Each structure stands twice: as C-alpha cells, then as structure tokens.
Image (cartoon, rainbow, N blue to C red):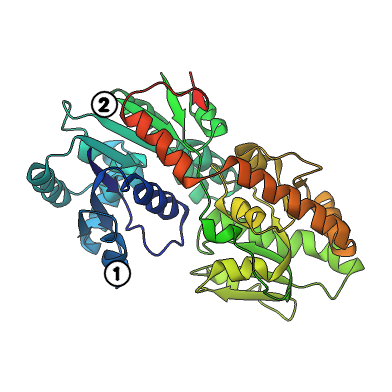
Amino acid sequence: MRILVVLSRVPWPLEKGDKLRAYHLIRELSKKHEIILFCLSDQEVHPDAERKLNEFCTEVLIHRLSRAGLLFRLLTSFFNGLPFQVNYFSSKRAQRVFDRYLEEHIPQHIYCQLVRTAGYAMPYPTLPKTMDYMDALSTGMNRMSKAARWPMSIIMKLEQRRLAAYEALIYDHFDQHSIISEQDGQSMQLPGKVHVIPNGIDERFFEAGDTPKTRDILFTGNMNYRPNVESARYLVNEIMPIVWAKHPGLKVCLAGANPAPAIRALASSKVEVTGWVDDIVEVYRSARIFAAPMLINSGMQNKLLEAMATGLPCITTTLANDAIGSKPGTEIHIGDNAQDFAQHIIALAEREDQRKSYGEAGRAFVTSRYSWATEADRLEKVFMSEELPMNTLA
C-alpha cells in the first residue's frame, strides 16, 4: 500500500514526542508499505533530516512555512473560530504544494498526525484516511489554562474550547481514528470509535551498558515545552528542598533540548542542565533514579517508558501513570504531592535493593507491553479497517 503521511513537523531529530512517534511508526510501516512523506516546518530543518528519512521513505517533501505567513495566520485566529495551532499550520501555499504532491503520487491511504494537519487531507473525501489525534490536545490545553497566569489563561481556555470543537468536527472526515492512550480517548468524548495505538520503545533502550552511575536524580524531555518546564520547576523548587533537608548531597540532572530561560535559571551546584545530548540512552544509564512529576501533560510519557526500559526505578504522578498502566508499588512509585514524591526519592536513594527491584520490574513491564513493531502492525490493521481485538475505545 502507498501511504501518504502528513506531519506538522519534520520527524528528525527525535527531541519531541510527536516526532518520535511518527519516525518509529513510519519506519516500521515502511517494511511492508511504500511511505510518501509530507512535512511542514516552521524552523530550519536539521541538515541530516532528509537523509535519515530517505532511508525508509520513497519520497520526502518538506515544506517550509514562512515566518510572515505564520504571524498573519495567528492574527486571523481571533476572527475565524479555528484553533490557533490549526491556523498556524494551515497555509494556502502549502495546500497547493500538498495537492500537487498527492496528485503526483496518488496514495492509497492518507495518515495525518495531530489535528493541525487535518485540513490538508479533508478535500479528498474518496481517499481512505486515518487521523492520529495522538494526544487529547483539548484536555491538555484545559490543564495548562488552569496553571497559567492571565492573560495566557484566557487565551488557552479559548484554544481549549476551539480544539474540542475542532476535534469533533473533523471526526466524520476520516475513516479511521487513533490515539495514544485510552485515558486520552475517553477524555475527548469523540462521537465514534477510536483505536488506541500506544507508543513503543526503541530497541537501543533495552541494550545492556556499563555506563557508570554519575547522576542521582534525572528528569528528561524537551526543556522548552511548557509542561516539562513546569514539572522541572516543581521538582527542583518544591520536591527537592524536602529531599535536600535529609540528603543535601543529592544532585538533579535536567536533560533535554532547548532549555527555556526558566530551566537555565534552575542550574546550580546541585542542579545540572545539560541542553541537547547526543545520546539520551547514555544519560538514562548514568542515573540512579528517574523522577517525572508530570502535572499538566496529557498523553503517554515516552520519558517514563524509556527510563523503565533502561532499568531505572521511576517515580511519577497518577496522571502520567494512568496512560502507561504500570503497577504502583511494584513497577513504579506514585507521588501526587511534593511530600510523597520526596519520600519516594529518599527511600530509593537510601536503598539500593529497592532501586534494583523497581528497576527490574519496570523494565519487565515495558518489555512485555511496548513495541514499535507491534504498534505498527496494529496501525496497519486500522488502515485496513480490520477489527482490533483489544486497545479499542468503543
């Protein structure tokens, strides 16, 4: 089958969750199908991106969105009622490029990731289409609006209402629908069936390594993404003072690309801010404890799956764990307030046997549940309109 994949970002390098999901799913799908890739980009493209993507895509077209056009479309968002991020990525010029690309390659199926790409495929009602909502964007925006200050809280609340309406509006324009977790699918209340296609884990994370344990407590992610920024600040400013009162020598590492000013401001003799790292696997292997106090994120946290795959004992919140389904008290620690979270860190810091036990249990859980090859096979069945035996919201 010739599949036209439509993305709002170029899926390389893999520093964001949507890029990681797209990259691994289309790489696995390419083993059986012909992948024609259409990517939008609002920034400079990594010099190795096209080469990496051409390794498994038959054709790759990256359309660069102009800065002036982006600003104009954001302004129109105040008047046309569409979500800001849909307007941001919706370009008439890009649509014309997309139309020519589609007519040249005539796909048998269109796979769109995130609602911001839906408009490009909707003019083709006779072509089979799948929309990967990925995360419940409207739900996530609602959480962020509650944590934001005025006037951003008002803008985010407006965006939440528009996203919820748009998520429902585009539903009938697509034949099949997928999402990353059952938790997200239920929160969106879409009018029909949505297939749950979780993320997998790159095999590299399961490989044994002999990296020395030089970091105490680790948190990873795109450090310019607001939910990650808020979680990192909460870890350092609210949780760690409780830990440091008992163990002042423990240090925190915040590892990830594009650290925002608020993240850089956290750097100290006790807090390492790495910025971009060439091999995140080695960073996981260098740590003793993984702490992810996710407060407002929706969707599946790849960072947790990756940390567990490398054998790291993990602590997170109920919100984040609900999406992955690990067992609190045996496979993962749960802390929904600063005091509980800190106590879990202290317990793991003091007991190597607990670190080993939780690390092994978490690794076994991820090994048994999460595979990119398995999820790509499930997605293929979605394309074929086959019924899936499990992980399907009715």
- Tag 2, which secondary structure? helix
Residue at the spot 53% in from the left edge and 50% down from the top edge: 150
Q: Residues within 10 Å of mark 2 (few under 14, many from 20)?
A: some
First-in-chain label (2 vs 1): 1
Specify the amino acid type for callout 1. Glu
Expressed as whole percent of the image width and height from the top left, the position of residue 162 reads 39, 35
Specify the amino acid type for callout 2. His
Whether residue 15 sits left or right of residue 79 in the image: it is: right
- Tag 1, which secondary structure? loop
Residue at the spot 43% in from the left edge and 61% down from the top edge: 14
Q: Residue 233 carries which label?
A: none
- Farthest residue to the bottom: give it: 269
Expressed as whole percent of the image width and height from the top left, the position of residue 185 reads 50, 29
The one nearer the camera, 284 or 377, is 377
Q: Is residue 264 visible?
A: yes
Q: Residues within 10 Å of mark 1 (few under 14, many from 20)?
A: few
Q: Are marks 2 and 1 in contact (CB under 8 Å)?
A: no
Expressed as whole percent of the image width and height from the top left, the position of residue 345 reads 82, 58
Could you tell me how far apart the alpha carbons at marks 2 and 1 are, in whole angstroms?
32 Å
Residue at the spot 19% in from the left edge and 49% down from the top edge: 91
Q: Which mark is residue 173?
A: 2
Residue at the spot 8% in from the left edge and 42% down from the top edge: 103
Expressed as whole percent of the image width and height from the top left, the position of residue 87 reads 28, 45
In this figure, which residue is indicated by the disc labeled 1?
44
The one nearer the camera, 145 or 60, is 60
